[in-house]
Amino acid sequence: MTAAATSFAITVDVNGREHALRVEARDTLAALLRDHLGLTGTKIGCGVGECGACTVLLDGVPVVACLVLAVEADGRRVTTIEDERDPRLEALRQAFVAEAALQCGFCTPGMILAARALPEGADDEAVRAGLAGNICRCTGYTAIVRAVARASTTRGRGRRRG
Amino acid sequence: MADLPPLRYARPRTLRAALTALARPGACVYAGGTDLLVALGERRRWARFVRELVDVKGIDEARGVVRRDGGLRIGALVTAAELGVDAAVLRHAPALAEAARLTSAPALRGRGTVGGNLVTPHPAGDVTTALVALDAMVEVASARGPRLVHVVDFLAGQDAAWPTQRLVLGVRIAPRPASAFEKVAGRAAFGRALVAAAVVAHGRAVRVALGGLGARPFAAPRTAEALQRGDGLATALAAECRPGGDGDAAHRLALAAVVVERARARACA
C-alpha cells in the first residue's frame, strides 16, 4: 500500500468475520460492504456524506461509508447493522420497532449505528446532537430519540436472534 | 453520487516518500476525504486533475497538538472531532474549538482534518475562519523542510494555485484565550455556514475573520475597527464583504452584523 496501485488485496473484519478480498482503489467502503460482501443493510442515500444513511462504525468510530475508501478498511474492524453479536445494537433494533421509530426504514441502519456510537445513557440533547448527521424524511425524529433512550434502559433484556 | 473516477492510491509512511509521490503528475493529498471524494464523484472542476490519491494519514509530522514557542502547534491531520475537545485548544484558542465543534456532523468531524479545511476551496470553512482570526501560520512541507506561510497568504495562493499538491503539515497559533466563533447555517449539521465570524481580542486589538461572505474566509480589519469604535459596523461590513452565492446579499450582511456582535460579546466577556 506504500506503493501506488489501482487495486489492493485487503483483509477486513466485518461484524466479527474476517474477509480477504481484492478492492479497487476507487471502491468506497459502502461498495465493499454492499457489492463485495452483499451486506445491503448499509444504505446509500445521497452518496456525498450529507444524509448519514450509510453510517457504519470503523474501529468503533462512526463514519459515512460513502466517503471512506475500501482500501482504508484494510486491517480494521467494521460494524454494520447486520452485526448480531452486539447487545447494544440489538437493544437499539428492538427499541426502534417498539417505539415505531421508522416508517420507510431507509435511514434506520444509519440512525442505529450513529446511536450505537453515543455513550450509554446519553440525554436527549446528546442524542439529537449525535444523530444530527442522519436525515429521516418520515418520522420527524421524536420517536427516534425516544427509541435511543429506550434502548439504553432495555439493554441486555429480551434479546432476540434476528 | 457517480462512481469515483479511475484512481491510483498510495499510503507513504514517511514525509519524504509522500513528497516524492506528490511530485507525480495527477497526485493529490488525501486525508479525511470528506470534500475530495465528493468533488471526485461529482467530477468537480477543481478535482479533475486527480489521478492518484496520496493518503498522508501515516505521516507522523502532521499529527497531534503540542505546546510550542508559547503557543500551539496543531498537526494538519488533527480532525475536527479531536480539535473540538482538545484541552489545550479549548483553553488557548476557544474560537478554534468552537469552530471545530460546529463543523458538519459527527461522522464527518471524525474524518475531516485541519489541513483539509485549509486547502478545500470552500467559502466558509469554519476552522479556516477561526485560523484567519487567530493569525495562524501554516507549515507547508517542502524537500528543504517546512515553510511557514501566513494563513491569509496561504489562502490567496491556494485560490490561484489549486491544484498545487501542497502538503500542509500543521498550523501554529499564539495563545488567544479571548476568542469566540459564531455561525448561522441553514441546518445545524453540515450546514455550510451562511455566515460565520471569529473574533479574537488581544490587549487592545480586536481581530475579525468572516466566512461565507467571500470566495474564502478573510480578515476584516475595518469591521474590527467598527466593533471597537461601537459605530459604523454595517458600513464596514458592506465595504469588506462580497456576499455572493446562495441566499440574498442583504440578508447575509444583516446576519454578519449579528454573528460578529455575538462573537465579540463572548470573546470580550
Image: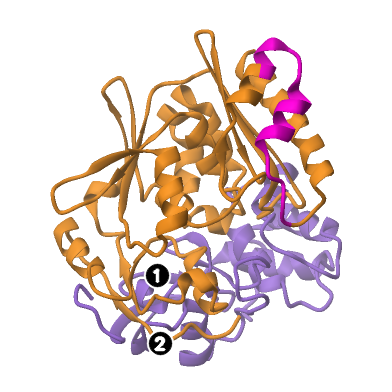
- Of the 4 image quadrants, the one containing the N terminus of chain A is bottom left
Picture quadrant of residue A47: bottom right
Whole-percent x, y for residue B215 in the image = 59, 51
Where the C terminus of chain A falls, by quadrant?
A: bottom right
> Which amino acid is tagged 1?
Arg
What secondary structure is found at the residue carrying circle 2?
A: loop
Marks 2/1 in contact by CB < 8 Å: the verdict is: no
Is residue B256 rendered to the left or right of residue B3?
A: right
Identify the secondary structure beneath mark 1.
Answer: strand
The chain letter corresponding to orange is B
Three-letter amino acid code at the position of disc 2: Pro
Judge from the rendering whether residue A63 lies leftward or rightward of residue A18; answer left or right.
Answer: right
Whole-angstrom CA distance, mark 2 to mark 1, is 26 Å
State the purple chain.
Answer: A
Identify the residue position indicated by label 2 in the image: B6
Residue stretch in magenta = B226-245
Q: Which residue is mark 1?
A: A77
Q: On the picture, is B96 further left or further right than B17?
A: right
Question: Do the residues at pointers 2 and 1 share their chain?
Answer: no
Find residue B260 and name its label: none
Foreground residue among A155 and B176? B176
